[in-house]
Amino acid sequence: MATVDISDRIKQLDTTLVSIEKVLDIPKMQAEIADLQEEVGAPDLWDDQANAQRVTGRLSVLQSEIEKVSTLRQRLDDITVLLELAAEEGDADSRAEVESEVDRLSAAIDSLEVRTLLSGEYDEREALVTIRSGAGGVDAADFAQMLQRMYIRWAERHKYPVDIYDTSYAEEAGLKSTTFAIRAPYAYGTLSVEAGTHRLVRISPFDNQGRRQTSFAAVEVVPVLEATDNIEIPEDEVRVDVYRSSGPGGQSVNTTDSAVRLTHIPTGVVVSCQNEKSQLQNKASAMVILKAKLLALKKAEERAHLDELRGDVQASWGDQMRNYVLNPYQLVKDLRTEYETGQTQAVLDGEIDELIEAGIRWRRNQTTPA
C-alpha cells in the first residue's frame, strides 16, 4: 500500500472520528460526568439505593464512552506521527506496522460509529433475551439451544456477564424456551435487531434416514427495567404458579417447589424463573422479567406496531428474518440487510458482530426520512 493511500485512509478515519465526537457531544458528556461525580461524592448517596445505582451506573457508562473515544483519538494521532517518520526514513517495517494499525483502527472506529446509531429510549439498557422453539419438532428445540449458545458465546467474547433466569428443556433434546439477561450497557440497543424468527436448514441429526430438515426459533429482546421505570402491576392481575425445577430429561434439580411461573391475566404474558434457590428469589426475578415484557408491549402498542421492541415471534414459514443453511451449502444470510457469510460455524460460535452492525445500520436507514 502506497504511503499516499495510507495517508488518505487516516484522513478518512479522522473525519469519521470527528463526526462521532460531534454526535456523542463530548463536552456535554464531560459536563454530565462532572455533575454525576458530585452526586457520587455526596455522603447520603446510598440512602436511596435505586438512585445510587442509577447515578453510579450512568457515570460508569459515560466514563467508558469517553475513554473509548479518547483512546481512538490518541491512536489516530500516534499513527499519523509514525507514518511521517516511516516516510522520512524509508522504514518498510514501520510502514507495515502503520498499515496493520490503520486496519485495526478502521474496524474499531466503524464499531464505535455503529454505537452512535443507538439513540432509542431504552437502547443503553441491559437486555433480556427470550428464545422459543417453533415449527420443526425436536430440530427446532435443538436450534433454540444452538441460538442460546450463540448469544452467550457472543457475550463471553465481549466479557459481558450473563444471568440465565429460566430454561425449559424439551423431552428429546434442546430447549422449549429460555430467558437470560446480558448485563452490559447498550446490550438492548445492540441485540434488539436480533429479535424475530430465525430459520435453520440442515441434515437432521435426529432423522434416521438423514433427511434435510427446516426448523424455526423465535428470539425476543426487551430492555431490562430500572427502579425508576414506572410499571405497576396490581396483584389481582397476576396468577402465580409454583413447580419443581428440573433439568434435561426431567432430572430433578430441586427437591422443593421453588420454580415460579407468573401469568399476567389481562395480556396473557407468561414468564417463569427457576434459576434461584428459593421460591421468593425466583418470584422476584420473574417479576423483573414480566415488567420488562409489559413495558415492551406498552411501548410497542404506543407505536402501533408490536414488533418494534419485541420483534416477530411467530417462528414459522414465511416470516423469518435470518437463515442459517448448513446443507446443501454453508451460508448465514440476513434477509433484511442482505448481509451473508459462509462462516456458519463461526457465527454459531458467537461471531455475530458484523451481522448485528449490519442490522443496526439497516434499522437506521428504515427510520430515517428519505
Image (spheres, grey):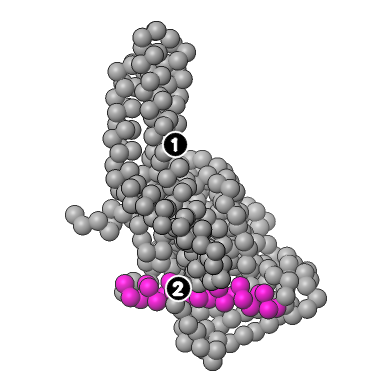
Q: Quadrant of the N terminus?
A: top left
Residue drawn 46% across the image and 57% down it = 38
Which residue is farthest left?
A: 370
Which residue is farthest front?
A: 43
Residue 314 screen position, x and y as percent: 46, 69
- Relative to residue 27, is residue 198 drawn left or right? right
N-terminal of the two: label 2 or label 1?
A: 1
> Of the numbered discs in the image, which one, if any, rests on residue 229?
2
Is disc 2 placed on a helix, strand or loop?
Answer: loop
What amino acid is found at the position of numbered circle 2 in the picture? Asp
What amino acid is found at the position of numbered circle 1 in the picture? Thr
Is disc 1 placed on a helix, strand or loop?
Answer: helix
Write down the quadrant of residue 130 in the picture.
Answer: bottom right
Q: In which quarter of the image is the C terminus?
A: bottom left
Residue 267 screen position, x and y as percent: 46, 83
Residue drawn 34% across the image and 22% down it = 6
Is residue 92 in the magenta section?
no
Graded by Cα atoms within 10 Å as few (under 14), some (14 to 19) or many (20 or more), the crowding at tag 2 reads few
Residue drawn 46% across the image and 49% down it = 63
Residue drawn 62% across the image and 76% down it = 284
Q: In this view, does 164 lie above or below 273?
A: above
Task: Provide the residue designation for mark 1.
Answer: 71
Spatial CA span between label 2 and label 1: 34 Å
